[in-house]
Image (cartoon, rainbow, N blue to C red):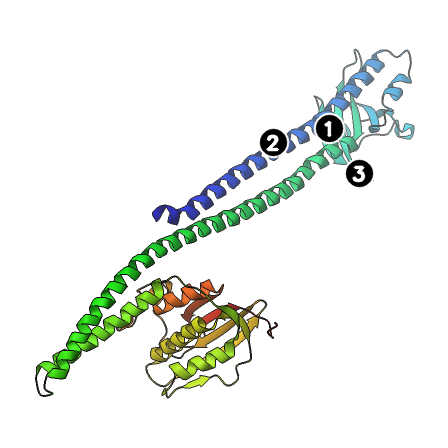
Amino acid sequence: MPGHAHAPIVVRTALAALLLLVTVMIVFTTWQSTRVLTALAEQSLENTALALSHAAEKALRTPADPGEVRQVLSDRVVAYALIADGDGTILFHTNRRLVGTRLAGGKAAWMRAENPIGERIVLGTGLPAYQYDYPLERAGKTPQMLRLVLHTTSADAIMARAERMWWALGAVLALLWTLGLLFERLSMRSIRLEEKMERQRQLGLIGQMTAVLAHEIRNALGSVKGSVQLVVEKVAAADPVKPALALAIQGTARIETLVNDLLLFSREESYRIETVDLAEVAREAARYALEGWEGTATLDELPQARVVADREKLLRVVVNALKNAREAMSGPGRLDISIAAHGRWTTLTIADTGTGIAAEALARLFEPFFTTKTDGTGLGLAYAKKVLEGMQGSITLANRTDGPGAVLNIRLVSGRKERHG
C-alpha cells in the first residue's frame, strides 16, 4: 500500500510547511508593525519639537510681549529650553539662573548644527529625553540657536507597546505550534488506525484463503501419509526402499505441522477472558517447554501477578516463547524470567543468553512466515502477536543491552488481586 505508506510523510511535510509559512508571515508583519510604531514615536517627538520651535521663533519676531516665548516653552512636554548666540552664550533659559552662562564646548560645538537636528539623550537625572537644536533666523541679529529638550514619556510608551508585540508574537507562535503538533498527533493516529484496519482486512482475507487451502492440503496429506505408512508396514526391514519411505513420512509430518500452524494462525479467534496468575502460567509453561533442558531458569521467585487474559492462549504463547529462547542458546544457558507491574500493565520478561538477533531481522520478527530457523514455520511470533493484541496486550522482542542474547516482553492488562462473584 504505497499511498498509505507515504501518507504520514506527506501530512507532516505539508503541516510543517504551513506552520513555517504562517510563522514567517506573522514575524514579518510584527517586524513591520514595530518598525512603523518606532518611526511614528520618533516622528512625533520631532514634530512636537518643530512645532514648539516655530512657535518660539514667531514669538521672538513679535517682541511686544517678552513673556510670550517663555509661555510657549513652558509646555509640560519640555524638560528645559534655551537660546544661545554664536559663541555659546545663553541668552534665554527656562531656568533664569542659567542666563548669561555659556554652553559646554563653546562656539565650535554650538555652531555645528546649521540645520534642525534631533537626537536622544539622557538627562543628568538618568531620565531619557529628546534634544532638538533649531537655528533661529532673526534679521540683523547674530546667529542664534534654540535648543529644546523634551520628555519622551509618550513616545517611549508607544515603543514599549511595540516591544510588547514581540511577547504577544511569542505566545501566539507557541499556541500555533502547540495546536499544530496536536493536530499532527491526531492525524498520525487517524492514519495509523486506518492502516491498521486495512491490514486487518487484508489479513482477514488472507486468513480465509489460507484456511481453505490448509484444509484441502491436510485432507490430501492424510491420504498420502496413510498410504505411505501402509507400504512401510508391508516392506521388509532390509528393503532399501524403507529409508526413503521413512523420509517421506518425516516430510509429511513436517507439512502436517505447517498446515496445523496455518490453521491455528488463520482462524477467527474467540477469547475466554478471565483473571489469571501470570506467574503460575509461566511455571506451567516452563514444565512443558524446558523439560530435559540442562540450563538454568529463574522461576522460583516469581511474584503472584494477576492479569486479564485467555489462559489457554496465553499458556501456548509462553510455551512457544520459552522453546524459542531455549533453542536460541543451542545448549545449556540461562533464562532470566521476571514479572513486573507498572500501573495498569503487568509484563513478563524472558531473557536468554544466546547469540541474539541479527539487525536486519529485528524489524520482521512478527511478520507471518518470516523465520531465522531452518525448520521453523515463521508463524509462532505472528500468532503470539495476534492473540496478545486480541487480549489488549502486546509483545516485543529485541537484543539484550546488558550482554549477548535476546529479551522478550509480554505485556498484559493487570487484573484484580482477588476474584469476586
Q: Secondary structure at mark 1?
A: helix
Q: Is residue 90 left or right of residue 213?
A: right
Mark 1 is surrounded, within 10 Å at the Cα level, by few (under 14), some (14 to 19) or many (20 or more) other residues, namely few
Residue at x-position 30% and y-position 64%:
369
Q: Is residue 38 visible?
A: yes
Q: Secondary structure at mark 2?
A: helix
Q: Position of residue 265 (x, y in %)?
A: 35, 65
Q: Earlier in the sequence, mark 3 or mark 2?
A: 2
Q: Is residue 276 left or right of residue 249?
A: right
| Residue receiving disc 2 | 32
Q: Is residue 74 above or below residue 159?
A: above
Quadrant housing residue 305: bottom right
CA gap, disc 2 to disc 1? 40 Å
Quadrant housing residue 151: top right
Q: Position of residue 411 (x, y in %)?
A: 49, 68
The dot on residue 60 is none
Mark 2 is surrounded, within 10 Å at the Cα level, by few (under 14), some (14 to 19) or many (20 or more) other residues, namely few
Q: Nearer the viewer, residue 333 or 386?
A: 386
Q: Nearer the viewer, residue 98 or 130?
A: 130
Of labels 2 and 1, the one closer to you: 2
Residue at x-position 53% and y-position 84%:
301
Q: Identity of the amino acid at label 1?
A: Ala
| Residue receiving disc 3 | 127
| Residue receiving disc 1 | 108
Q: Nearer the viewer, residue 238 or 116?
A: 238
Q: Position of residue 58 (x, y in %)?
A: 81, 13
CA gap, disc 3 to disc 2? 28 Å
Q: Identity of the amino acid at label 3?
A: Leu
Q: Is residue 333 above or below residue 188?
A: below
Q: Earlier in the sequence, mark 2 or mark 1?
A: 2
- Which quarter of the figure is the C terminus placed in? bottom right
Q: Is residue 172 left or right of residue 258?
A: right
